[in-house]
């Protein structure tokens, strides 16, 4: 078995969509990024790469290799096809002040399970706020973390 951990943070700004786990969440602010900025998928990709001892997401997909606004689902699918990780389970945390994600967690879970090709009961999506503290608490950024177990 091999464990992997990934973390990502993006600034939030008016204009781009808020993408989390391949789902567009209605929001006035979205991730500033070269790709679609999906912090959850970026954290998941880095967790998979970490478990396999592979180069990280920044090395694998440098900005010049990614189209502007590229869907992070495409990047994750590419990693799945290239490396064929056998996933036991994945646990994630999204930290975002607004909007509250409780109504979207199930949809995000379904999307992540589908992208990873595993059952939903092997995917955990947890959402929390930063209690108003720091940049995330001020609504300036969103963070995601992911731990993954492979066999
Ligand atoms: Mg990122």
Image (cartoon, rainbow, N blue to C red):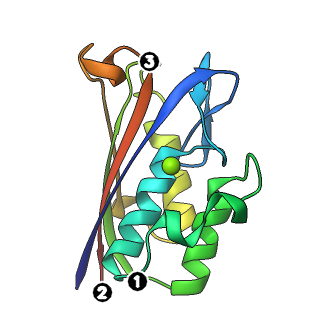
Q: Quadrant of the N terminus?
A: bottom left
Residue at coordinates 42% horizontally, 60% vertically from top-left? 44
- Element type at marker 2? loop
Mark 1 CB within 8 Å of ligand 1: no
Q: Which mark is residue 151?
A: 2
Q: Nearer the viewer, residue 115 or 103?
A: 115
The location of residue 109, given as percent across then percent down, is: 46, 49
Residue at coordinates 50% horizontally, 54% vertically from top-left? 41
Tag 1 and tag 2, C-beta contact below 8 Å: yes
Residue under numbered circle 3: 98
Disc 3 from disc 1: Cα separation: 34 Å
Residue 17 relative to residue 56: left or right: right
Q: Earlier in the sequence, mark 3 or mark 1?
A: 1
User: Compared to 107, does 61 lie above or below?
Assistant: below
The location of residue 103, given as percent across then percent down, is: 46, 27
Q: Earlier in the sequence, mark 3 or mark 2?
A: 3
**Which residue in the rendered view is the most extreme toward the front?**
64
Residue 101 relative to residue 17: left or right: left
User: Compared to 104, does 118 lie above or below?
Assistant: below
Residue at coordinates 60% horizontally, 42% vertically from top-left? 23
- Discs 3/2, front: 3
Residue 23 relative to residue 66: left or right: left
Q: Sort mark 3 into few (<14), some (14-19) or many (20+) by Cα contacts within 10 Å.
A: some
- Discs 3/1, front: 3
Residue under numbered circle 1: 86
The location of residue 119, given as percent across then percent down, is: 44, 66
């Amino acid at each position: 078995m091999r464990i992997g951990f990934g973390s990502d943070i993006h600034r939030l700004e008016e204009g781009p969509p808020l993408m989390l786990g391949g789902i567009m969440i209605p929001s006035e602010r979205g991730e500033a990024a070269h790709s679609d900025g999906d912090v959850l998928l970026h954290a998941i990709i880095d967790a998979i790469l970490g478990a396999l001892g592979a180069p990280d997401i920044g090395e694998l997909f440098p900005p010049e290799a990614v189209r502007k606004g590229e869907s992070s689902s495409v990047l994750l699918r590419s990693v799945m096809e290239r490396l064929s990780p056998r996933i036991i389970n994945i646990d994630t945390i999204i930290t975002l002040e607004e909007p509250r994600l409780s109504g979207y967690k199930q949809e995000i879970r379904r999307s992540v399970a589908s992208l990873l090709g595993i059952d939903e009961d092997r995917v955990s999506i947890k959402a929390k706020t930063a209690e108003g503290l720091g940049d995330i608490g001020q609504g300036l950024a969103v963070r995601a973390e992911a731990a993954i177990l492979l066999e």
